[in-house]
Amino acid sequence: MKVALITGGAGAVGSATARMLAHDGFSVVLADIDIERANAVCDEIRRSHDVDATAILTDLADIGSLRPLLDAIGKKFGRLDCLVNNAGKTGASRIGAVDVDEWNAVLTINLTAPMLLCQEAIPLLKASAGASIVNVASRVYLSGTGVGYTSSKSGLIGLTRTLAVQLGKDRIRVNAVAPSFLNSPFNKKNVERNSSLAESFKKITPLGRLGTPDDVAGAIAFLASDRASFITGDILHVCGGAQLAPSPD
């Protein structure tokens, strides 16, 4: 049975991804700082699917916790078929007010931890007959938004492409999804501060709606599957067309 590790597994996108991968037959490991929510998601998955679902308390801000996380997976399963670097953090938005500690915190969660997880996971991924890494980036790498968030997600795109080249010889595929603004709890505070924000994103999206966690999870599940066995180093935009140039109409 295939095994997937999902960081930020208790969140909206992480839990939706865990459910879809479980539906596809993966046993899932949810790494999250909110262990109660992660355990609740695992309980739900075990009730709904005939797979193993495990929650592991993990603080990605503490890079020393990453090796024990992979050790626990290795001890229990002896392999890893998919690593989903989903956890994310916003902050350090305006260049004139960037606090270095906040900047470092954003980059640690969004870029450094994913890089280290990829590094630590290589032996377990190599034990799979065709493993994959899926990094959750963002459409902001095309357009820019907060300084810290955009810089970290742009770096994650670069990491994705570099690892696709370096790990291909080990039959490890590395791709990213780049969602647009989602209708999710992650963006709740942004919408509360700016009530017109969601409507603005709807207007620039040809499909005329906001994306959902399930939309992103579906893209991740595809890239993790054998149906994507010849896709690596790619960026799958989950934006409803918002990554395109504005319509001339």
Image (spheres, helix red, strand yellow):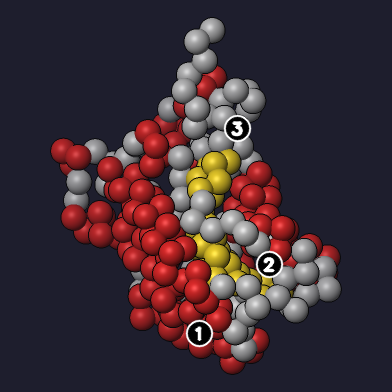
Q: Position of residue 31 (x, y in %)?
A: 54, 71
Q: Earlier in the sequence, mark 3 or mark 1?
A: 1
Number of residues whose C-alpha sits closer than 10 Å to that of mark 2, classed few (under 14), some (14–19) or many (20 or more)? few
SS class, disc 1: helix
Which kind of residue does numbered mark 3 sit on? Answer: Gly
- Nearer to us: label 2 or label 3: 3
Distance between the Cα atoms at labels 3 and 1? Answer: 36 Å
SS class, disc 2: helix
Q: Position of residue 248 (x, y in %)?
A: 50, 10
- The residue sitting at 39% across, 61% down in the picture is 162
- The residue sitting at 65% across, 86% down in the picture is 77
Q: Position of residue 110 (x, y in %)?
A: 39, 58
Residue at mark 1: 123
The quarter of the displayed image where residue 140 is located: top left
Distance between the Cα atoms at labels 2 and 1? Answer: 30 Å
Residue at mark 2: 40
Number of residues whose C-alpha sits closer than 10 Å to that of mark 3, classed few (under 14), some (14–19) or many (20 or more)? some
